[in-house]
Amino acid sequence: MPEEKVKVAIDYKRCDPRRCDRGICSAIEACPTKLIKQIEPYDSPYPVAGFCQECGKCLDACLLKAISML
Ligand code: SF4
Ligand code: SF4
């Protein structure tokens, strides 16, 4: 069963929202349960607790491989 916890980490040494389309984190769209948030385009995204399916879609969506499972 998916648990309501933060299950992914973002490596801010790798993450660069300027490399994503219009500054919008690609993982936001990829996550089926919307567990990656961003206040505004070009801001650093951050993961939130929720029912993570551990599907890995956010990992695959990030071209800079900045996201990993915890
Ligand atoms: S897709 Fe990756 S590089 Fe782009 S903002 Fe999200 S975590 Fe950062
Ligand atoms: S593993 Fe899947 S459900 Fe969990 S945060 Fe990433 S995209 Fe969302």
Image (tube, rainbow, N blue to C red):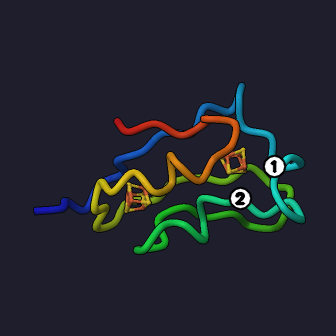
Residue 20 sits in which quadrant? bottom right
The 10 Å Cα crowd at callout 2, few under 14, some 14 to 19, many 20 or more, is many
Position in image of residue 70 (x %, y %): 34, 36
User: On the image, numbered disc 1 is attached to which residue?
Assistant: 17
The 10 Å Cα crowd at callout 1, few under 14, some 14 to 19, many 20 or more, is some
Examine the rendered structure and indicate whether residue 44 appears above or below residue 70: below
Examine the rendered structure and indicate whether residue 60 appears above or below residue 41: above
Position in image of residue 16 (x %, y %): 80, 40
Position in image of residue 3 (x %, y %): 19, 59
Query: Does ligand 1 reach within 8 Å of label 1's beta carbon?
Result: yes
Position in image of residue 40 (x %, y %): 81, 67
- Residue 66 has which mark? none
User: On the image, numbered disc 2 is attached to which residue?
Assistant: 25
Residue type, label 2: Cys
Q: Is residue 28 left or right of residue 6?
A: right
Residue occupying the point 81% across, 49% down: 17
Residue occupying the point 78% across, 64% down: 24
Q: Are marks 2 and 1 in contact (CB under 8 Å)?
A: yes
Q: Residue furthest left?
A: 1
Q: Secondary structure at mark 2?
A: loop
Question: Mark 1 or mark 2, which is nearer the start of the sequence?
Answer: 1
The quarter in which the N terminus is drawn is bottom left
Query: Does ligand 1 reach within 8 Å of label 2's beta carbon?
Result: yes
Front residue (pair 48, 60) = 60
Examine the rendered structure and indicate whether residue 38 appears above or below residue 60: below
Q: Is residue 4 left or right of residue 24?
A: left
Residue type, label 1: Pro
Residue occupying the point 61% across, 31% down: 11
Examine the rendered structure and indicate whether residue 33 appears above or below residue 26: below
The span from disc 2 to disc 1 (Cα, nearest Å) is 6 Å
